[in-house]
Amino acid sequence: MRRRAHTQRLLASDSGVTIELVIGAIKAVVIVLLVLGLTTLMLWFERKGSALIQDRIGANRADIFGLGKRLGMPNFGVINTVLADPIKMFTKEDFVPDGADRFLHGLAPFLALFPVIITFAVVPMGDILKIGKYEIDLQPANLNVAALYVLATIGIGVYGIALGGWASNNRWALLGGIRASAQMISYEIAMGLAIIAVVVTYGTLDLQQMCRAQGGVWFGFLPRWGILLQPVSFLLLLISGMAESKRVPFDLPEGESELVAGYFTEYSGGKQAVFMMTDFAEVLLVAVLITVFFFGGWQVPWLYRDGFHFPGGAAWLLPNIAVAILQFVAFWIKVIILSCLQILIRWTLPRLRYDQLMRLGWKGLVPLGLLNLVATAFVVVAAGGK
Amino acid sequence: MPQWLFAFLAALAIIGALGTILQRNLVHCVLGFALVLIDLGVLYMGLGAVTVGFLQIIVYVGAIMVLFLFVIWLLNIQADTGVRGGASLSLKLVGALAAAALAAELFVVFSHAPKLREVRTIAPAFGSVATLAHVLFSRYLIAFETTSLLLLAAIVGAVALARRLAGQSAEVAAMPSQPGSAARESRREVA
């Protein structure tokens, strides 16, 4: 009798663990699929957006059996970017140059992409979702030192680029790899200072807690978003984040007018596509970090756990599931807007010179970040924070 | 941390360490070392010191090992050509002494370590940022500040040295060696 009760208890706790595992797996799959999907979407934005900016038409040819044309649909180049190009790239010959370090040459693209993808594991995509008796935290991995985790994975990201340049046995590639690692290490400092200032402001390293702290309003109507507390950090993170993603105006590691294509000169087909995906995933990552730190993460203005409470007293109560969906959608809309902002900047500015890049990083952003950090610390202590 | 995970990580650390000392190509050695450092970071996290584990990865893997790669590339250190018996007797002697000292140190540490059955579970706040910061800025404040002063002095010294060197030599630096450099050189000689 007693044994049976024990077994039942075991089974019950076992199924609880299993459901936790299933929920965790679903969250992991959702975030990875979202990131890969949005990366492709960014690629399309980049194509058509740059065409728009430069007064070109852009991709508008590929079609499936002429279906779109027969139905009279305008061709926006979606099939070009989402289907035709990946198929072309991944079926191309995978060329490894003579004398290259074959192992590292093959490893490098994935060493570049992997840290960026795993960083998304700590991204809070929403508050609590209640299904039955389960309360699901819409953050794939709830880590209480998530800000440190982000800095660690971004730090590891240098290796793929640097080794890709070195292993190619090509001097342009090597120069690109060296440039990339110098640039990324330099701008990581400014990035770290920006993130630390935010951490000091909220008194936590937990991204979910930061998002929660940005709920509510000031003066009855203004959302308590971080950008109003830390505008300098926002600029620092935007600039250093763009430098981390190695795109114009910080694309010296690629520098096609001097270095052929920089660190990926000797890459073709699928591996080159992985490098390209890394860049876009980094754009997305920077947008995600800025959203979480400065634009309230999943917070929708005036939306609370039980529904909207507009300034002036009007309220519109919503069930938990609607609130969770709204938060989730709001988060990704903010991310897409910030990614588009980065694409806009990328197609607006020319490339910096290398000395300008280093001067901006070390003499501009780092001192600014230090000053901002000290000022933040003073204000937090004066305000009686922890 | 489950025991199988610890065993796996420990084995990985040893493989990485062997890779660091046994490989000919210096870049591969550095990667082996980076693997060891990441692995140690994960081990720290598994043992409850989460903050220290992440700091280990940020500082050592994210910054210091990249500088190692830089130095290897910029100083143009060639891969070991495979000729053995190059190390002199004095080098071997010093190496043996250092290894013996390390072994003695490990022996002392392990013999003073608490027995496994006396080990108590750690406090829940152990290894958190708050605990770590509290210890660093109260009990070890002087050591902490002295270390940061020392690092500052090192930075200033490095900048001063680099300035003088930059003023003196206008020599164009040689290209760093890459996997196929030796072959490229020999081809050039044939031509």
Image: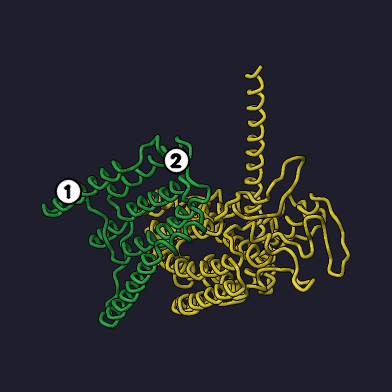
Chain colours: A yellow, B green
Q: Residue furthest left?
A: B89
Q: Quadrant of residue A344?
A: bottom right
Q: Amino acid at mark 2?
A: Arg
Q: Quadrant of residue B144?
A: bottom left
Q: Quadrant of the C terminus of chain B?
A: bottom left
Which residue is depicted at the point 83% across and 63% down? Answer: A309
Q: Residue furthest top?
A: A1
Which disc, if any, is residue A347? none
Cβ–Cβ under 8 Å for marks 2 and 1: no
Q: Is residue A109 visible?
A: no
Chain letter of mark 2 equals B
Q: Is residue A127 visible?
A: yes
Q: Dot 1, how many residues are within 10 Å of its Cα: few (below 14), some (14-19), or many (20+)? A: few
Chain letter of mark 1 equals B
Seen in the picture, residue A282 relative to A131 is either above or below; the reply is below
Q: Residue furthest bottom?
A: B167
In this image, A222 relative to A373: left or right?
A: right
Which residue is depicted at the point 40% across and 65% down? Answer: B141
Query: Number of labelled discs?
Result: 2
In this image, A261 relative to A289: left or right?
A: left
> In this orientation, which residue lies closer to the viewer: B77 or A52?
B77
Seen in the picture, residue A311 relative to B22 is either above or below; the reply is below
Write down the residue under mark 1.
B96
Asked which secondary structure carries label 2, the reply is loop
Place of residue A29 in the rendered image (x, y in percent of width and height, measured from the top left):
64, 45
Asked which secondary structure carries label 1, the reply is helix
Gap in angstroms between the C-alphas marked 2 and 1: 37 Å
Closer to the N terminus: mark 2 or mark 1? Answer: 1
Q: Amino acid at mark 1?
A: Ala
Place of residue A14 in the rendered image (x, y in percent of width and height, measured from the top left):
63, 31
> In this orientation, which residue lies closer to the viewer: B20 or B148?
B148
Write down the residue under mark 2.
B120
